[in-house]
Amino acid sequence: MPTERQANSHVGAEAAAKLGWWHAHRFLVLRRISQLSILALFAASFLYGLDILKGNLSSSTVLNTVPLSDPFVLAQLIASGHWPAETALLGGAIVLLFYMLVGGRSYCSWVCPVNIVTDAASWLRRRLGISKTTRISNSLRYWLLGLSLLLPVVGGLLIWELVNPVSLLQRGLIFGLGSGWVLIAMIFLLDLLISQRAWCSHLCPMGAFYGLIGKLSVIRVNARHRERCDDCMDCYKVCPEPQILKPVLKGAANGVSPIIFASDCTNCSRCIDVCAESVFEINTRFTTEVENKNEKPIATIFNCHPVCPCCC
Amino acid sequence: MVGLGLTAWASSAKRSDPQAIRPPGALPGDDFLNACLRCGLCVEDCPYDTLKLATLFDPAPSGTPWFEARKVPCEMCEDIPCVAACPSGALDPALKNIDDARMGTAVLIDEKNCLNFQGLRCDVCYRVCPLIDEAITLERQRNSRTGKHALFIPTVQSDACTGCGKCEEACVLDETAIKVLPLELASGTLGQHYRLGWEEKARNGGSLVPEQLKLEIRRPENSNAN
Ligand code: SF4
Ligand code: SF4
Ligand code: SF4
Ligand code: SF4
Ligand code: SF4
């Protein structure tokens, strides 16, 4: 147990030692800045009337002109039989296109505040060396997603939005949480004590929805230098969806692309942060795979720098 | 299973406290719950901070806008900023004149304690009503206690009352005698088969049944009228 605890508390330590603290935490810090500043802008609008971003993540306006709406909430409205007004539809389309481009679950790691809660639970889990976990199927979230869109059709009532912890928390942080913290505390404890990454990686239908949106998205994490991997396992420990890492890291022999095409990937880029061997990069799905082939890559001849994407 | 649980949860969670009043133009009942994105844009654009966004276990389903008339009533803005802000149509954009809003209707619910019912001239609810003499009128009655004075009974005309709650806020009693209630709670519904004779007559331009026949008075041949 103590050895495991030690090993656990040092996820990313090697990377920090080798590449510097900033390098080993940059995406984490950037993500937190992104998540918190979005909430702060909403709150500033509510509290001080500073209308850069007004509303909340369910629907908002940018500078009082451009509408944005959450396509998942819109899908539920439509399922319950209400055809939304044009403003909301336009806002939904803008958000949809954005995530289709940058990766659906970028919403999870760069925007959603619940991610901060579940990341904290996962961090504490590693710190305390809690390894006991109840298995929950990864695909349960898709069933819940189906349910959240089916129940309104059957019952004619927008059921999921009455309890959706994501809506509850983000709204609560802007407009006042009331007793909503109870639900958030439950998610934290569930993730911490009962099942690892239970909420975001197994249950949340919103994450599942955004995952599906991003199936064909352009921005992708890429295990481009997978031949350098020394099996330290740090990325597996920090990744919220570790099941997607093995195929890309170990798939060279089977001709599996090093680009993470799995829609479960949240583009959180923590794998890039914690990897001391700089295996991962974030770029587009069109990045050439040439460099990772075992035979001497032709393209490298033209490369000015090993990680420069400009001409490959 | 999960679905059943959620549905059960939801049907209890969707219930509103009768004193949680919706913004102007809100679609009726469940339609509103199904249409509202819970974005709070209406709340943000309400210049009087009337509207609040419900949190979990508030009197309205979480995330939906509501207000408590006794605390901050709706000031009936002429440009209806809350409706203009709503992206989803949950607050009906067809509402152009705030006087047509039906957020609920005021009901003078406690006739025992209302000062005017005791023969005093409080009149406060009547005076503050933005639609004075339309939505609230004072109806004169005899004061049987003194035998020589009049009672001025504040009477809500529910077909004109917008449910803004100015009267509820202003009532001088410790616990208000006049309260805004949702229309579903405060109004009755006439049976489907009812026809109001005078309305049918007006619509038809005359009575629907033939005028009563005038029958000749017939007496037996040789009977004597005297
Ligand atoms: S899975 Fe759900 S709760 Fe987790 S970050 Fe994504 S949207 Fe938020
Ligand atoms: S693969 Fe990397 S970027 Fe994707 S979810 Fe895992 S840690 Fe985050
Ligand atoms: S009409 Fe004016 S005061 Fe009333 S709820 Fe709307 S914005 Fe607020
Ligand atoms: S603006 Fe419309 S959709 Fe948004 S909270 Fe208010 S009523 Fe609901
Ligand atoms: S303000 Fe209250 S007490 Fe006075 S007349 Fe109206 S209902 Fe009665």
Image (spheres, coloured by chain):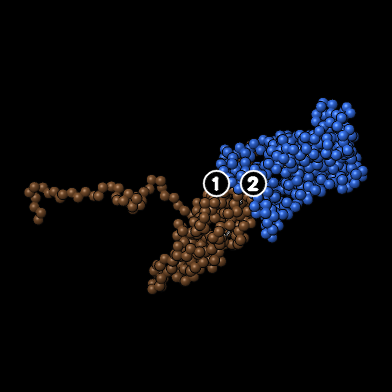
The residue tagged 2 is: A91
- Give the quarter of the figure containing the N terminus of chain B: top right
Residue closest to the eye, A100 or B191: A100
Chain containing the residue with disc 1: B
Judge the density around disc 1: few (<14), some (14-19), many (≥20) Cα neighbours within 10 Å.
Answer: some
Work out which residue is located at the far right of the displayed protein and give it. Answer: A18
Chain containing the residue with disc 2: A
| Residue A27 visible here | yes
Residue closest to the eye, B186 or A61: A61
> What's the residue at 88%, 47% (across, down)?
A21
Query: Residue A144 vs residue A246: left or right?
Result: left
Kind of residue sitting beneath label 2? Gly
Q: Is mark 1 within 8 Å of ligand 4?
A: no
> What's the residue at 38%, 45% (across, down)?
B193
Kind of residue sitting beneath label 1? Asp
In the figure, A229 relative to B122: above or below? above
The residue tagged 1 is: B31
Work out which residue is located at the far top of the displayed protein and give it. Answer: A254
